Image (cartoon, grey):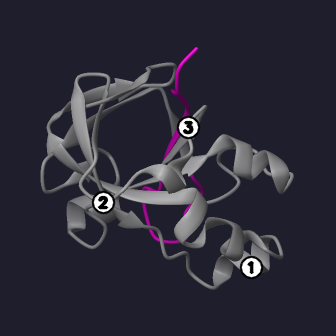
Amino acid sequence: MGPTIVALHLCPASRAPLVAVGRVAALRDQGLEGDRHAKAGSHRQVLLVERETLDQLGLRPGDVREQVTVEGIDLSALAAGARFRAGTAVLEVAGPCTPCERMNALRPGLMDALQGRRGRFVRVAEPGSFAVGDALVAG
């Protein structure tokens, strides 16, 4: 089975608990619909995090303020500019994620695990929607 989306989480307000959702609309220049940060324009990119990396650290999807957890894909192998389809949306890899220092307060080593290797920021190249269980298709 190919790469799939395991969990979606949106941060509705600064320092608010994550909200698990079943389906999101991906909007060009706005990130994910329902993400208040994206609508405000401060975080217009979508953060992908590997389920496998969270498992290694004893975390569940949603324990970190990531937006989309995926499994079955090596995010470090995705070069900037690579595109893939998630549901009906097309996402383009923008670059490695640069986690904030607060992540190490959550779990020692978490920032190092994600920095530049196991997390990727993507932008919405073509709007659409995707849900938990949808496949990630390269191209």
Quick one: SS at disc 3?
A: loop
CA gap, disc 2 to disc 3?
A: 15 Å
Q: Earlier in the sequence, mark 1 or mark 2?
A: 2
**Disc 1 marks which residue?**
104
**Disc 2 marks which residue?**
80
Q: Nearer the viewer, residue 139 or 103?
A: 139
Q: Are marks 2 and 3 in contact (CB under 8 Å)?
A: no
Quick one: SS at disc 2?
A: loop
Q: Residue at point 77% right, 80% down?
A: 105
**Disc 3 marks which residue?**
73
In the image, residue 135 above or below residue 103:
above
Disc 1 crowd, CA 10 A, few/some/many (<14, 14-19, 20+): few
User: Which SS type dominates the magenta stretch?
Assistant: loop
- Numbered disc total: 3
Horizontal side of residue 90 vs 77, given as left or right = left
Q: Please indicate, yes or no, whether residue 65 appears anywhere in the rendered image.
A: no
Horizontal side of residue 10 vs 114, given as left or right = left
Does the magenta portion include 99? no
- Which residue is situated farthest in the top direction here? 1
CA gap, disc 1 to disc 3?
A: 24 Å
In the image, residue 38 above or below residue 19:
below
Q: Nearer the viewer, residue 7 or 36?
A: 7
Please state which amino acid type lies under the numbered disc 1. Answer: Asn
Q: Earlier in the sequence, mark 1 or mark 3?
A: 3
> Mark 1 or 2, which is nearer the eye?
2
Tell me which segment is drawn in magenta.
Answer: 1-18
In the image, residue 101 above or below residue 96:
below
Please state which amino acid type lies under the numbered disc 3. Answer: Ile
> Mark 1 or 3, which is nearer the eye?
3
Disc 3 crowd, CA 10 A, few/some/many (<14, 14-19, 20+): some
Q: Please indicate, yes or no, whether residue 57 appears anywhere in the rendered image.
A: yes
Quick one: SS at disc 1?
A: helix
